[in-house]
Image (cartoon, rainbow, N blue to C red):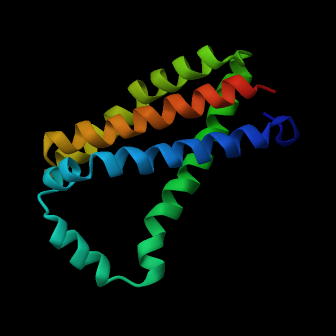
Amino acid sequence: MMAHSVNYLSVLIAAVAAWLFGGVYYTSLSKYWLAAQGKTLEQCQAEQAAKSGAAKAAPFIVVFIGELIMAWAMYGVLFHMGMFTLRAGAISGAALWLGFVLPTIAGNYVFSGKKPMLIVIDSAAWFGAMVIIGAIVGWMGK
């Protein structure tokens, strides 16, 4: 994939959409996510209060950069398959999530002793992000 052939606008829009989805998703499931972490809201608030502004922002920035990379890689997959459609993108996002993201999250979380519900919550968030990224990149095409 040559740099000049990438539709960077589709990559950016897909990353922003996935990032916004994550914000809505985790906000709506915050109670369950905290319980799966084994934390209370008060503990989480105390941890956040102890952090600097940069330390508070860092996770959001890292996730957004990761989603930019994922969207760029998704563009490459769809480019090489020659299948720029919303459907092909969404299916590719789901397949890549199943083949790469879910096993990685599950393996890491099991070895670190995380609760199964945390695997479900976090992997479902990445499923949504991958499908959104794939659908947008596929829809916007070359």
* Quadrant in which residue 79 is drawn: top right
| Residue at point 58%, 34% (across, down) | 133
| Residue at point 42%, 77% (across, down) | 55
Depth check: give the residue in front, 20 or 73. 20
| Residue at point 60%, 45% (across, down) | 15
Left or right: 9, with 67 as reference point:
right
In the depicted structure, whether residue 12 falls above or below residue 47: above
Left or right: 135, with 109 as reference point:
right
* Quadrant in which residue 1 is drawn: top right
Image coordinates of residue 91 in percent, x first then y, are 52, 17
Image coordinates of residue 83 in percent, x first then y, are 70, 15
Left or right: 119, with 85 as reference point:
left
Depth check: give the residue in front, 44 or 64. 44
Depth check: give the residue in front, 27 or 52. 27
Image coordinates of residue 4 in percent, x first then y, are 88, 40
Q: How many marks?
A: 0
Image coordinates of residue 42 in percent, x first then y, are 16, 72
| Residue at point 15%, 39% (across, down) | 116
Quick one: quadrant of the C terminus? Answer: top right
